Image (tube, grey):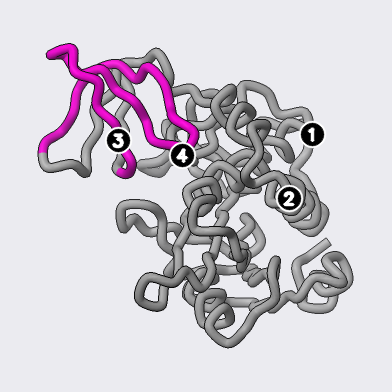
Amino acid sequence: MPLTEAHVQAALAPRAVRFYDVADSTNDIARAWLHAGAPDGAAVVADEQRRGRGRMGRVWQTPPGAALAVSIVLYPSPAALPRLSMLAALAVCDVIESLGGEAVGIKWPNDVQIGGRKVSGVLVEAEWERERLLGAVVGIGLNVSVNFSDTELADSAVSLADVLEKPPDRLELLAALLARVDYWYARLESAALYASWRARLVTLGQRVTAVGQAEPIVGTAVDVDASGALLVRDDAGTLQRIVAGDIALG
């Protein structure tokens, strides 16, 4: 079933939803809605997203009819804010596995992969008023039937249609994804969320290069802490705590 305003509103009721045939960035729309008083769990959905953002300033485009672009307004406690990335990645993993997807894992901190190729990205943006947390927006992009063959991403990106017996219905996929977001949001500060996220990390035990710090850190990813930081033992034997940045494996 195509994504239309009527279909999306009906499938997600009673959740507050705004739907766009074309949007520059669902996160930007959701952030503005947050400042205007959006209710907890409100969602912005676009059939096509032209200027979506990924982590580290990357562009995340959503072709019409071929992917999901959704941003959810949430109001966590400041202490739980780092766990929103865990929540989103776990929700995506749960949905893919429920459809029969295999070899699903998370590359730290929140890139969901199938067989080592990226199928989904997450961008969490917090909104502050001085030192007061107003809320946060969790943006999720999920490749459903994007064709990456003959592109520079052919070896690093994948769509659900490539690995499942049949392409999933995007409306059903959207409803299932938001249901899992709700499930984990209710458990945001639980040990279960952290343990489930950690168990899916494909990064642990691997040689990594972490960039985004003053100097790249090269070593072995040995663990993560409860706030989501990656612990890397560098080649000098020092345990480094990485809160944000980008990781190259190998």
Q: Marks 3 and 2, Cα distance to the nearest angstrom?
A: 27 Å
Instruction: Locate residue 162, reporting x and y percent.
Output: 64, 35
Q: Label 4 belongs to which residue? A: 227
> 96 or 15: which is nearer to us?
15
Q: Marks 4 and 1, Cα distance to the nearest angstrom?
A: 27 Å
Q: Label 3 belongs to which residue? A: 242
**Circles 4 and 1 in contact, beta carbons < 8 Å:** no
Magenta segment: does it hold 236?
Answer: yes
Q: Marks 4 and 2, Cα distance to the nearest angstrom?
A: 17 Å
Mark nearer the viewer, 3 or 4:
4
Figure quadrant of residue 77? bottom right
Mark nearer the viewer, 3 or 1:
3
Instruction: Mark 4 or mark 2: name the one nearer the start of the chain.
Output: 2
**Circles 3 and 4 in contact, beta carbons < 8 Å:** no
Vertical position of residue 174 compared to residue 154: above or below: below
Please name the residue shown 80% across and 70% down the image: 15
Amino acid on which the number 2 mark rests in the picture: Ala
Element assignment for label 3:
strand
Q: Marks 3 and 1, Cα distance to the nearest angstrom?
A: 32 Å
Q: Label 1 belongs to which residue? A: 98
> 2 or 56: which is nearer to us?
56
Q: Marks 3 and 4, Cα distance to the nearest angstrom?
A: 11 Å
Instruction: Mark 3 or mark 4: name the one nearer the start of the chain.
Output: 4
Q: Label 2 belongs to which residue? A: 186
Amino acid on which the number 3 mark rests in the picture: Ile
Amino acid on which the number 1 mark rests in the picture: Ser
Element assignment for label 4:
loop
